[in-house]
Amino acid sequence: MENGVEILLVEDAPADAELTLRELRRNNLANHVHVAEDGVDALDFIFCRGPFAARSFAAPPRLILLDLKLPRVSGIEVLRAIREDPRTKPIPVVIMTSSKEQRDLVEGYKLGVNAYIQKPVDFEEFRKVIQGVGMFWLVVNQPPPREMFTGQS
């Protein structure tokens, strides 16, 4: 990815973030992961503003793993902002949440999430889910062409 970010992990629970990072790296699925601990940090990173103003839309993350229950700005609002902007709309977004609320699932899909995963409580199951998500989105899935993010044809 030419020093780009492969995954933006938006997660406010340090234990979940650490386990996710460890599992991705253990399976050699991602070398460059940026962790945003709240919705504001995630939006700043995605939209190349504030402390991330030097970033370019031409090098988007290949995948966003998005928790829903975040401080300052919710995951649903982050997803809404991503899908409303043509520069970020093609980025695959996977909601990974402990929420069992049907309305969160429905709202996520209405807004265009690519997948919705309820985080397993069991450690081994959580590891398997992270491995499967990473394997599919970073190895098997064909990402959108870079031109979709830059407006070039």
Image (tube, rainbow, N blue to C red):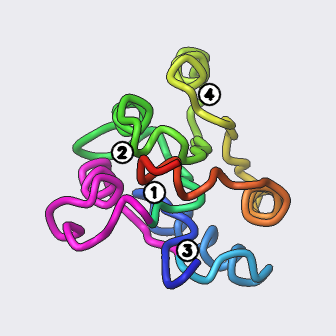
Q: Amino acid at mark 1?
A: Glu
Mark sitting on residue 121: none
User: Quick one: label 3 or label 4, which is nearer the N terminus?
Assistant: 3
Give percent across and percent down for residue 21. Answer: 60, 74
Residue at the (53%, 48%) spot, across then down: 153
Tell whether 48 sits left or right of 106: left
Q: Secondary structure at mark 1?
A: loop
Q: Residue furthest front?
A: 153
The alpha-carbon separation of the residues under discs 2 and 3 comes to 16 Å
Mark sitting on residue 100: 4
Disc 3 marks which residue? 18
Residue at the (55%, 58%) spot, across then down: 146
Give percent across and percent down for residue 110. Answer: 55, 17
Comparing marks 4 and 2, which lies closer to the viewer? 2
Q: Residues within 10 Å of mark 2 (few under 14, many from 20)?
A: many
User: Quick one: label 2 or label 3, which is nearer the N terminus?
Assistant: 3
Residue span colored magenta: 33-58
Q: Amino acid at mark 4?
A: Lys
- Whether residues under marks 4 and 1 lie with C-beta atoms below 8 angstroms apart, the answer is no
From the viewer's side, name the closer residue of 10 and 121.
10
The alpha-carbon separation of the residues under discs 4 and 2 comes to 15 Å
Disc 2 marks which residue? 70
Give percent across and percent down for residue 60. Answer: 46, 61
From the viewer's side, name the closer residue of 121 and 137.
137
Disc 1 marks which residue? 11
